[in-house]
Image (cartoon, helix red, strand yellow):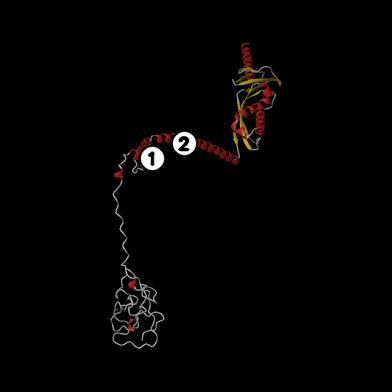
Amino acid sequence: MVEELLTVGIAAAAGVAVYLAAAARVVKQYERGIVFRFGRLRQGVRPPGLTMILPVADRLHKVNLQIVTLPVPAQEGITRDNVTVRVDAVVYFKVVDPASALIAVEDYRFAVSQMAQTSLRSIIGKSDLDDLLSNREKLNQGLELMIDSPAMGWGVQIDRVEIKDVSLPETMKRSMARQAEADRERRARVINADAELQASHKLADAAAVMSDQPAALQLRLLQTVIAVAAEKNSTLVLPFPVELLRFLERAAPTPPQDARQGPARPAPAAPAAAGPAGPPPQAVPGLPGPPAEAVPGLAAPSAEDVPGLAGAPDADTPGLTGPPAADDAPGLAAPPAEDASGLAPPSPEDVLGLSATPFEDPPERTGPPPQEAPAADGAAGSGPAAGEPPAA
């Protein structure tokens, strides 16, 4: 009998343990339990901890109350000022009514994701590019309101919506970069012009002070020299202004009137004549130039100085004689005074190249004598003038 009672007690305890194991559920701290008995919602939300349900009749659904971070895929749209952009965002939301999140919508996560994408496209079309780039706070608030309105009926609360990135076309990026560079350059030019204006005012004031006190310019020059010499330069360029010379001239004592007059300078001597004065040259008819004696300062060359006239006194050289005398040089000897026309009749020995050898007499010539070549120094020869008959 006792054995039977023990067996029944053990069986009952085992049954209770099995029941408790099947009916007991654990709800975590960040979760809430929703119980459906035979498909009908049980009133009340099971708190965190250990809870009991009927193993066959009840079904427990756990709902996460943590804030969910849901990334929104990048959406491409056209802004109000006709610029194509790609915008991606992120949505932060949490469940505030577990029963509505399970009953009102099939999958609240997917519903919130699709709603965020459509709202993001709508906000892109209603905004300008400048608003997307610089006024994102206002766009985030508007996007949050657009998503939160239908999500409240699903038991979901939108905590925050942020626009992460705005992708622009390359051409638009270059245009914006040029605009930014132009604006920066304009500001730099304005700042430089303002600095030049202020510096010009200060320089004008300094110039006025230096004009009243000339010593200030000298002090400033000395300061410049000190500043340059501090760099240990081997070469020092020292500017010397004209104002400093004027200052030194005014500061120097005035010399007496007699001292400023220097000794009388001697009168310059008259220039010497180019050559000895002689009688005017006589015009020689038939010659292109005046005789050698008529040129002042020019002496008649000797026979050795005339090239081509001095020949070797060798008998083997026909047609050449020894060095001629000064009177035989053509164009250098003055015409004899006895000739009325200014020229003496030439002899056969005076003609160049026609004189006989020193050992034999010159042959007789029946024709006119050859014309004499002009001298090398440009003087006229001593041959007969044009139009005169040759000598017999």
Q: Which amino acid is tagged 1?
A: Glu
Q: Position of residue 364 (x, y in %)?
A: 35, 88
Determine whether the residue tagged by mark 1 lies in a helix, strand or loop.
helix
Q: Are marks 1 and 2 in contact (CB under 8 Å)?
A: no
Where's residue 92, x and y in %? 61, 27
Figure check: 371 above or below 53: below
Q: Relative to the observer, which residue lies in front, 322 or 337?
A: 337
Q: Which residue is mark 1?
A: 243
Return the residue nearer the eye: 326 or 92: 326
Q: Which mark is residue 318?
A: none
Separation of residues labelled 1 and 2 (CA atoms): 21 Å
Q: In the picture, which quadrant includes the N terminus?
A: top right
- Determine the residue positioned at 60% across, 35% down: 166
| 216 left or right, relative to 17 | left
Find residue 38 and report its horizontal and vertical position in percent.
71, 20
34 vs 190, nearest the viewer? 190
| Disc 2: which residue | 200
* Amino acid marked by disc 2: Ser
Q: Earlier in the sequence, mark 1 or mark 2?
A: 2
In the picture, residue 162 is in which quadrant? top right
